[in-house]
Image (cartoon, rainbow, N blue to C red):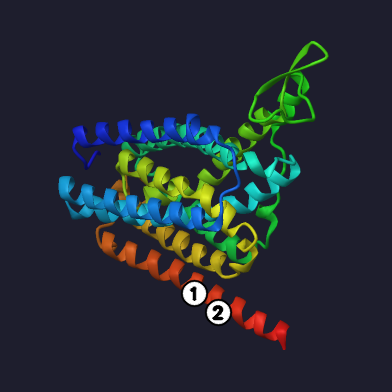
Amino acid sequence: MAETPLAFEIATFVVLALFFIVDLFIIGRRPHVPSTKECVQHIAFFVVMALIFGGCIWYFAGSKPAIEFYSGWLTEYSLSIDNLFVFVIIMSNFAVPKKIQKYVLSVGITIALIFRGLFILIGAALISRFTWVFFIFGAFLIYTAIKLVIGGDEDEEYHENGLIRTLRKVIKITDEYDGEKLRTTRNGVRYWTPMLIVFLTIGTTDVMFAFDSIPAIFGLTKDPFLVFTSNVFALLGLQQLYFLLGALLDKLVYLPAGLSIVLGFIGVKLVMEALHGNTLPFINGGHGVHWVPEIPTWLSLAVIVVAIGGAAIASVIKMKSMEKVEKA
């Protein structure tokens, strides 16, 4: 299923591993609140790196996997913006000091990528063995798309999951932070700091979001390498977006509509692909339904760009019109 050379994949993983090591153990050890200028510069850097990486894929593997990467990256990036709503709530609920929030996000996102990597491996194994899984993925994405439009804001609330609740019962955790430390001493007794809970909360909460984002990207590419790197480049920019857009997230009023179009489109695409490779005996006698048209990769990219870009532009116009009304 791999569409890229093995040497290129190995080199990519080595570079990404070095980046995360530097980010966590060097940059992360200088806690601070990023300025607007720093956030913009970092976001621009990661966007350029994603574009360059896609260009490298194009050079080493051809246009098709490159377009698949760009489509997956844009989809994952757009879906990941929803994570920011919950990250803001988590940071507030746990009273994480502003100074160490960037470091917390770095560790949380690293944990999330490990979990997502496992999800991707499981998904790739299922797809390679059971093509009918696409019917489930497609139906789930269509359901999620409808829910985004009519489901209100219920997904924006954070509820502590079972893993965190259980952890609180079995280990000693203080109520106060001790810088970036996971362990601290109080009256001669060793305790875990709330940092441990925050790390796990962000990491495991992100996994919940992966339930729609992972099937979505498998609708764009079947290559696990492209699926994983799309997730990596999408999540890398979340730290800076968190600080830059934290106060403006509720202004992106049309983002759910744009995401619903993307998820609905990919859901339909998955169902159509499942029909092409059908093996279920109760559909067309277990044979593929070849009259169903195939959606080209470039069309997927075009739909994603138009839907997300249109939603962003419409949100900005709406925000400006509301500001004019308020001033008047």
Which residue is rendered at x = 20% and y = 51% of the image? 58
Which amino acid type corresponds to the residue marked 1 in the rendered image?
Ile
Kindly identify which residue carries mark 1.
313
Secondary structure state at the residue bearing disc 2:
helix
Which residue is rendered at x = 36% and y = 42% of the image? 229
Asked whether 36 or 275 is in front, the reply is 36
Which residue is rendered at x = 30% and y = 54% of the image? 51
Crowding near the residue tagged with mark 1, few <14, some 14–19, many ≥20 C-alpha atoms within 10 Å: some
Q: In the rendered structure, are the residues bearing label 1 and label 2 in contact, judged by CB atoms less than 8 Å apart?
A: yes
Asked whether 208 or 237 is in front, the reply is 237
**Occupied quadrant, residue 174:** top right
Extreme right residue here? 187
Secondary structure state at the residue bearing disc 1:
helix
**Quadrant in which the C terminus is drawn:** bottom right
Which amino acid type corresponds to the residue marked 2 in the rendered image?
Ile
Q: Could you tell whether 3 is left or right of 319 in the image? A: left
Kindly identify which residue carries mark 2.
317
Q: Position of residue 246 (x, y in %)?
A: 62, 57
**Quadrant in which the N terminus is drawn:** top left
